[in-house]
Structures are given as C-alpha cells and as structure tokens.
Image (cartoon, rainbow, N blue to C red):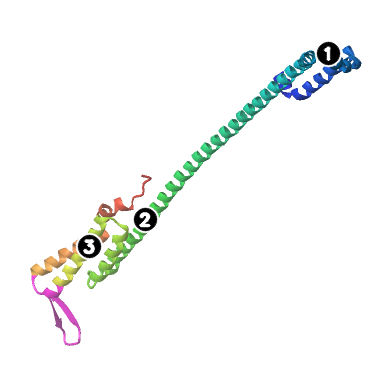
Amino acid sequence: MKKIWNGINWLILAGVITAGYLGIFLWWIGYDRIARYPANNSLNEVGDFIAGFFSPLAFIWLVAAVLTQRQELTDTRDQFAENQKVVDAQLKTINEQSGLLQQQHTLAEETAKRTYRLSLFQERYKIYEEFIAFGKQHEASKYDDAYLEMVDLTHKASFVFGRDVHEYFGEIAQVIYELEQLRDAHTTYQSDGAGNRTAIIKSQDAAESIGQTESWLWEQFFLPEERKDKFFASLRISDE
C-alpha cells in the first residue's frame, strides 16, 4: 500500500481533477452565462465569483504540492536509509578485511621470527661443526700453532653466539696461547747427529703442566658433556 501511495504522481492527478472540475463547471453553468457574467455584475461580484471558482483549485494544488513534497522527503529518507545500509556493509567489509590483514601480519611476523631462528641455528651449528673439526685437526699436534686459527673462530662465534659462547671460545684460545708459550719456555731439542731433533721438556713440573693443559683442551673438544654444557642452550630452537 505504501509503495502504491508513493508511486502516485500528485501533480498529474491534480491536473486531471482540475480539468474535470473545469469541465463540470462549464457544463453545469454554461459558457454563455459565464461570458455575460462580468458585463452584468459589479467588479466586487466578479471578484467574489473568481475567488469562489478558483479556491477549490488552489486547495487541490496545495494538497498536491504538499503530498508531492512529502513523497520527495520520503524518497530522500529511503535513499538515505539505503545509503546507510551500503555504508554499514562497507564498514563491515572493511572491518573483516582489517581483521584478515591483522591475521596475515601476525602470520608473516611469526614466519619471519621462525625463519630468523632457523637461520640463526644454521649459522650457529656451522660454527659448532667448525669447532669440532678444529679439535680433530689439531689433536695430533697437541694444538701447536693453533692459536691464530682459534682466534679467528672466536671472532666468527661473536657474530652469531651470545656472550657466554664467545667468552668460552676466547678462553680456549687463551689456553692454547699459554700452552704454546709454556712449550717454548720449557722445551729443548736434541739432535742425534743424523739431522733428527727430539723435543725434551726441561722439568717434570713443566711436563705435568703441559699435560694437564693438553688434557683440558682435549676435554673441551671431545667430551660430549663439555660441549652440551656450553652449546645446548644456544643450539636449542623453541617457538618462544
């Protein structure tokens, strides 16, 4: 019913009523009587006649104008309501997209963290393998002339490991250096006349000190308990 009411063109209807009103008026009074009326009556009477004749038409057009304006206001209100629905739908879509983007951001952030942790683990494990290979390489020579190589490995470790492992590597490098100094200070060489030289430790105390130092170094490189104690926390990967 409301849709039919809003679909009526009140101006056209007012025009139809006006035409009908004029037709009925002319048929009822007659054109000749209307034409003679101004000549046979005073101006006041003519004015009253014209006012009486047009007052219904004025009322009809006033009502038509009001109803037409009401229709326009109703259409504007309905259009505003439709626009509001569209805006609400857009806001809902934006909120959903915002939530999706937030989820994607969180996922990307977590992926980046995991990638970083994995990359860090790979670099640390590479240093760990170099550490083990270093021990095996210099075991036969009792870590003679290994100081500079250990210092280089210590510098590499400083970029990927924490302070504890870096200081541990530095401690080993320092012990190797002290071992070399101890050997140089307490070792003498004897020749057998055929060009062969034999290293001899000058004192028993020096020999024991050198042996203890070599034993400590061997433990650092070859005892799993020692390596686990130093490397486990750094090589362990967690989701935290």
Badge count: 3
* Type of amino acid under label 1: Asn
* Type of amino acid under label 3: Gly
As drawn, the residue found furthest toward the right would be: 32
Q: Quadrant of residue 153?
A: bottom left
Q: Residues under labels 2 and 3: Cα distance? A: 21 Å
Q: Taking 146 as reference, is 59 left or right? A: right
Q: Residues under labels 1 and 3: Cα distance? A: 131 Å
Picture quarter with the N terminus: top right
User: Which mark, residue 41?
Assistant: 1
Residue at the image point whose x is 88% and y is 16% from the top = 36
Rendering coords of residue 12 (x, y %)? 78, 24
In this rendering, is residue 71 above or below 190?
above
Q: Taking 10 as reference, is 141 left or right? A: left
Start and end of the magenta stretch?
183-203
Residue at the image point whose x is 59% and y is 31% from the top = 85
Residue at the image point whose x is 67% and y is 24% from the top = 69
Based on the picture, tell me whether residue 239 belongs to the magenta stretch: no
Q: Taking 49 as reference, is 150 left or right? A: left
Q: Is residue 14 visible?
A: yes
Q: Taking 233 as reference, is 35 left or right? A: right
Q: Nearer the viewer, residue 200 or 124?
A: 124
Q: Which residue is mark 2?
A: 120
> Mark 2, residues whose alpha carbon is within 10 Å: few (<14), some, or many (≥20)?
some
> Mark 1, residues whose alpha carbon is within 10 Å: few (<14), some, or many (≥20)?
few
Based on the picture, tell me whether residue 200 belongs to the magenta stretch: yes
Specify which label sits upstream in the sequence, 2 or 3. 2
Q: Nearer the viewer, residue 146 or 214?
A: 146
User: Which mark, residue 170?
Assistant: 3
Q: Residues under labels 1 and 2: Cα distance? A: 114 Å
* Type of amino acid under label 2: Leu
In this rendering, is residue 74 above or below 182?
above
